[in-house]
Image (tube, rainbow, N blue to C red):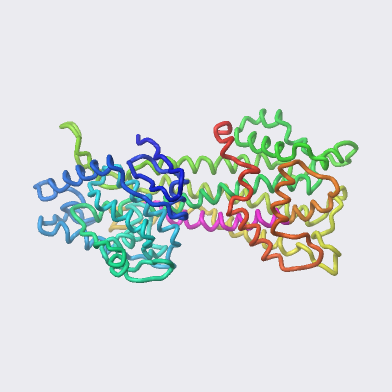
Amino acid sequence: MSQPQSRSNSADEPMNLDGGALTVPHVEDVARRGQPVRLGDGARSRLDASAAFVAQHATGPDAIYGVNTGFGSLSRKRIGPDDVREVQRNLIRSHAAGVGDPLSDDTVRAMMVCLAGSLSRGHSGVRATVVDRICDLLNHHITPVVPSRGSVGASGDLAPLAHVVLALIGEGAVRVDGREQSSAEALRQAGLEPLTLEAKEGLALINGTHLMAGLGCLVLADLRRIQHAALAATALAIDASRATDAFLDPRVHELRRHPWQMFVARRLRDLLAGSRILESHRLDDPRVQDPYCLRAAPQVLGAAFDMLEWGRGVFERELGAVTDNPLVFPDADERHEMFVSAANFHGMPLAVALDALTTGVSHVAGIAERRIYWLLAASDSENPVNVYLSPQPGLHSGMMIAQYTAAACCNEIQTLANPASVANIPTAAGMEDYNSMGVTSAHQARNAVDLAGQVIAIELIVMAEAMEYQRPLESGEGVERTYEIIRSRVPRLTEDRPPSPDIEAVSELIAGGAFDSIAAIDASAEWSG
């Protein structure tokens, strides 16, 4: 098993691809922050040895899938020695069949660094020059234009990756500084030569889970920030709703025995520690229990986080994997095959994890929307808030429609949570008869996480407004810091105004990690997991 890739201390310092496992932060650094990438010397020697091994056998008498044969259901067709290069180029051209809106630049870059990382492990039979050229495109910010639809997530993300490889060979379109141009022109301007594909290299470049892996990594990076914000919002909601903290008693959660439930309860206790609002109604409060959206927050969020962290673990393993076919083992002894046709390109592990992520996200957003509804309904006589938090009910509608927006987002997330991986459509004349549809799962997860960020933003705005009704009492330090961050962008509601700019402003705070240090998961991940 490969060792983890080391992470550079600076975004300007190149990340060496040495065959080790990438991480979600590695992928995000390259995809969004433009960190340079280069192939490590040890990996370079492994790749060249593997490529020489493939070249040695490409013109031999034995049929080797994708080296001297056709592809998919055409694998019984032999390719002559003089056509080994041409068949690789034709493979890329024929497989660049994507449709739909182009993928975002950060998604394409994430896909490319995942591809380079997998190839650097030396079991795909490609030359070091191939990985160098992928790094060149990343480092020169030449981003292939890749249609978003076309992969069934099984024989690799064939169509999207083929559009990437078109750019490597000087065909197709790219974006440079936001402007679309031909790849041939972009390569010329960067002083780069189009790549000529040798035996197996075209196949190795498109045979992998790199779109779903790269997109999934970006989803996980964004999701972590939403998890932090959701914890901060939940703690804020407890005092904004004048709820009790009795349900956070650690004895309760120890009896249930679920680590992430215990973590959520502990983090909420930390954020509320020192709250004068809690103390103000601890005695002689006629209410016996709070609604589930408050009282069951550790159980619901804990279950969701458990699922999300399981999915994160799947991706962390994938980021150290080789997802090619056939796999090349130059050092194999006489008891083992040197070329093994198998199915590491199959995306089912990631597809299932991505579907699970979307399910987890639906609960993070869903319980937040319920707290929004509960607070705005002003149905709790013990909490002195105006209905809809209106400055003057009737004359002003307050936050009424913000709850509608949260409900609409949650309904869409619930639809997206229908798993794509449970449906199968065969391809390649039945040779590829069970596909993962993992890229569909990735698109659904991407959209669900974006929508969840909007819901949590609405909750933060609503609960910050409700805190005004609790003054002059103050909450715990963590809750007050959350309140201050929101107020740095969103002023108190003194009269009706469009909520959309406020929601967008807080969504940007979440995306920028403004709540990460308040309710961090990372510092307690080992304890929790």
The answer to whether 24 is drawn above or below residue 105 in the figure is above
From the viewer's perspective, tell me whether residue 91 is left or right of residue 181: left
Q: Describe residue 399's horizontal placement relative to residue 106 as left or right.
A: right
Was residue 456 drawn as part of the magenta stretch in this picture? Answer: yes
Q: Viewed as shown, does residue 283 lie left or right of 209? A: right
275 vs 102, nearest the viewer: 275
The residue positioned 75% from the left and 60% from the top of the image is 491
Whether the magenta-drawn stretch holds residue 263 is answered as no
Closer to us: 288 or 21: 21
Residue 95: quarter of image: bottom left
* Majority SS type along the magenta span: helix
Residue drawn at x 47%, y 55% is: 32
Q: Position of residue 3 (x, y in %)?
A: 37, 35
Residue 295 in sight from this viewpoint: yes
Pinpoint residue 64: horizontal percent, then vertical percent: 17, 48
Does residue 222 appear left or right of residue 65 in this picture? right
Identify the image quadrant of residue 173.
bottom left
Q: Position of residue 182 (x, y in %)?
A: 32, 70
Q: Quadrant of the N terminus?
A: top left
Residue found at x 87% / y 47%: 382
Callout count = 0
Q: Is residue 459 above or below residue 258?
A: below
Residue lying at the far right of the rendered structure: 284
Image spot of residue 414 (x, y percent)? 59, 55
Say which residue appears at 85% left-offset and 69% top-offset: 395
Q: What is the magenta range?
A: 435-461
* Quarter of the image with the C terminus in it: top right
Asked whether the viewer can see residue 438, the reply is no
